[in-house]
């Protein structure tokens, strides 16, 4: 059984890892005025944060068109028997539903769509794990079972410099965003039941980072193998520093540095920082 692994661009899996593990990627779009760009293909992360600073109008985002999914699945049917298609949370984007609908439209390959209920490199970990299993010849059912099991151990926390981006994009309720900006807090956010909600209200970025470290420690101190990623919105040096510090403290954890690319960056704003992990 040959199973293809597809994920969407918001996994932000570093390109070399994606290529090494044959992970296929379908891009979401970022829109400036009347111009739509496929992220990771037509607009890269570095260019994006510069564009946002230089343009008056703030960008918006959109999910891939169903036709793009159909095209990709049909192309994969030439070399594979099945597809496991792994996507960002259905509570913040219609991408997962697009994958399901497209899967129903193609009949020469079976498509198993998976809602990670999260995004970014944590979604990337799902794709990576699935790709490793597919390379061992595991079929889609076995892969889907493992992906569902991973949901029990994945955790991710993130903070933003300015809550107004999330509020404007409708991915956090207005009331919560208002309270946050009034108090000038740096709330730690996380996902509950596919949606973004505040985890704790914390006053400074430094304290929020410390809190993320403590939360990681709750799992990492158990000594079991884990993968973890620091994720940043144009704060590479800070993220690399964090990764080095954490990797020294937890040698049994495989650490990555990833980024909030154009689509997620549109909703979080520059300066956002996150930490996520799962138990292997
Ligand atoms: C679309 O237009 O369909 C994409 C909408 C993306 C919303 C993104 C909201 C922020 C997600 C933060 C993820 C942090 C994971 C650690």
Image (tube, helix red, strand yellow):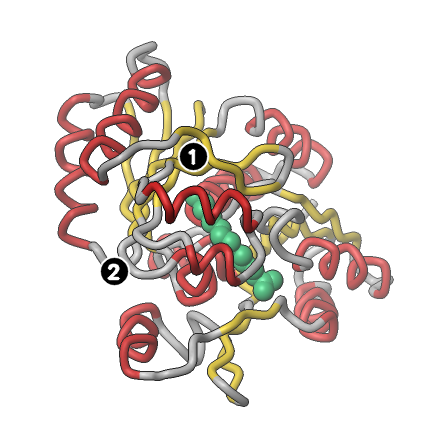
Question: Mark 1 near mark 2, Cβ–Cβ under 8 Å?
Answer: no
Residue at image coords 42%, 70%? 40
Instruction: Please state which of residues 189 and 103 is positioned toward the viewer in this rendering.
Output: 189
- In the picture of the structure, the residue carrying the numbered disc 1 is 156
The quadrant of the picture occupied by the C terminus is: top left
Instruction: Please state which of residues 124 and 170 is positioned toward the viewer in this rendering.
Output: 170
Q: Residues within 10 Å of mark 2 (few under 14, many from 20)?
A: many
Q: CA distance from mark 1 to mark 2?
A: 19 Å
Going by the image, does 95 lie left or right of 215? right
Q: Could you tell me if residue 24 is visible in this image? A: no
Tell me if the residue at label 1 has its CB under 8 Å from ligand 1.
yes
Q: Which element type, helix, strand or loop, lies under badge 2?
A: loop
Tally of marks: 2
Q: Write down the quadrant of residue 265 in the picture.
A: bottom left
Q: Which element type, helix, strand or loop, lies under badge 1?
A: strand
- In the picture of the structure, the residue carrying the numbered disc 2 is 234
In this view, 122 is above or below 221: below
Residue 134 in the image: state x and y as whole percent: 58, 42
Residue at image coords 34%, 15%? 218
């Amino acid at each position: 059984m040959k199973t293809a692994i597809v994920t969407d661009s918001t996994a932000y899996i570093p390109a070399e890892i994606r290529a090494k593990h044959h992970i296929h990627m379908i891009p979401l779009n970022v829109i400036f005025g009347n111009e739509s760009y496929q992220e990771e293909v037509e607009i890269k992360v570095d260019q994006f944060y510069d564009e946002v600073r230089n343009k008056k109008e703030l960008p918006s985002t959109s999910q891939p068109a169903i036709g793009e999914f159909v095209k990709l699945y049909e192309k994969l049917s030439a070399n594979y028997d099945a597809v496991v298609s792994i996507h960002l949370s259905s509570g913040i984007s219609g991408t997962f539903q697009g994958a399901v609908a497209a899967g129903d439209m193609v009949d020469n390959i079976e498509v198993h769509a998976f809602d990670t209920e999260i995004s970014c490199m944590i979604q990337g970990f799902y794709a990576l794990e699935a790709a490793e299993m597919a390379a061992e010849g595991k079929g889609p059912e076995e892969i889907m079972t493992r992906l569902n099991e991973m949901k029990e151990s994945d955790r991710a926390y993130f903070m933003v410099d300015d809550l107004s981006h999330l509020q404007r994009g409708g991915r956090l309720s207005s009331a919560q965003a208002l309270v946050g900006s009034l108090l000038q807090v740096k709330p730690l956010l996380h996902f509950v039941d596919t949606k973004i909600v505040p985890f704790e209200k914390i006053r400074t970025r430094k304290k929020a980072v410390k809190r993320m470290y403590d939360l990681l420690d709750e799992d990492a101190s158990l000594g079991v193998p884990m993968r973890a990623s620091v994720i940043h919105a144009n704060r590479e040096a800070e993220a690399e520093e964090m990764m080095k510090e954490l990797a020294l403290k937890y040698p049994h954890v495989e650490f990555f540095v990833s980024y909030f690319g154009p689509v997620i960056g549109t909703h979080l704003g520059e300066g956002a920082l996150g930490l996520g992990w799962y138990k292997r």
